[in-house]
Image: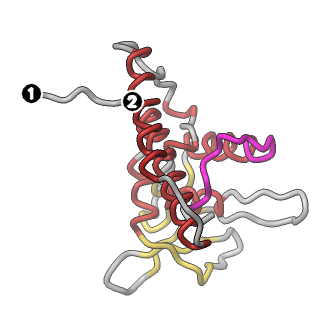
Amino acid sequence: MARSKIDPRLRAEFKEIARSIIGRDRRAKKLGRSQNTIGDIERALVEAFVFGQKLGDAPYSVPGPDDSGIDWEEVPPRGREVLASLTYRSDQYEGTNAIGLRRVPGGEKARWGSQYESGYASDHTVADGSVSPLVRIGLLAPYEGDEELLVLTAKGHATCDAYWRRLEERDPNLPRGNIRS
């Protein structure tokens, strides 16, 4: 029997709720405070159940065109940092963003470093596990004629533009940067 596919946006929201529960639990343990993790999980499950009852068989969200981007919540957490670093924006600092990620030669496992237009390649690298999901969901793609260089696609640009806009607006629903923050 085939399972019905759950909307990726809905799955992403559930994962964000789980991350926030785990983050609160870890923070409370670190500070020696009491926590009610079981209660948090129970409330989240009840909310999900009630939401599912309201939604019924209706689709959660309608897929948009391929180049319209996706919600930041749908970007894998390890990939969020990669995308944010590729498209960094700040009113305080004038900076030049990388044109993409270049595969770093050598080593057992693939690693990627930022490549700049000037030819400079960053010493800071990220694991393939942070980059390959971004390729899989169409936010990064190989540059034409150079399989070792990954650049943002139109979908990737739209996703990052929406992220930076939400960050400027201080959107309280924007996912946490990582589990520790």
Q: Is residue 110 above or below residue 46?
A: below
Residue bearing mark 2: 7
Residue 96's x, y, as percent?
Answer: 77, 66
Which disc is residue 1 wearing? 1
Residue toward you, 148 or 18: 18
Residue 178's x, y, as percent?
Answer: 57, 61
Residue 15's x, y, as percent?
Answer: 45, 46
Instruction: Indicate the quadrant containing the C terminus: top left, top right, bottom left or bottom right.
Output: bottom right
What type is the residue that disc 2 sits on? Answer: Asp
Mark earlier in primary sequence (2, 1): 1
CB atoms of marks 2 and 1 within 8 Å: no
Residue 134's x, y, as percent?
Answer: 46, 53
Q: Is residue 36 above or below residue 9?
A: below
Quadrant hosting residue 87: bottom right
Quadrant hosting residue 50: top left
How crowded pointer 2 is (Cα within 10 Å; few <14, some 14-19, many 20+) is rated as: few
Residue toward you, 39 or 157: 39
Q: Residue at x 62, y 72 (%)?
A: 31
**Span colored in magenta:** 166-178
Question: Magenta part mainly helix, strand or loop?
Answer: loop
Quadrant hosting residue 100: bottom right
Q: Is residue 32 above or below residue 4?
A: below
User: Disc 2 and disc 1: Cα gap in Å?
Assistant: 19 Å
> From the viewer's perspective, is 110 left or right of 98?
left
How crowded pointer 1 is (Cα within 10 Å; few <14, some 14-19, many 20+) is rated as: few
Residue toward you, 35 or 167: 35
Which disc is residue 116 wearing? none
Q: Residue at x 69, y 43 (%)?
A: 161
Coloring scheme of the render?
A: secondary structure
> From the viewer's perspective, is 14 left or right of 23?
left
Q: Does the magenta portion include 1?
A: no
> From the viewer's perspective, is 91 left or right of 58?
right
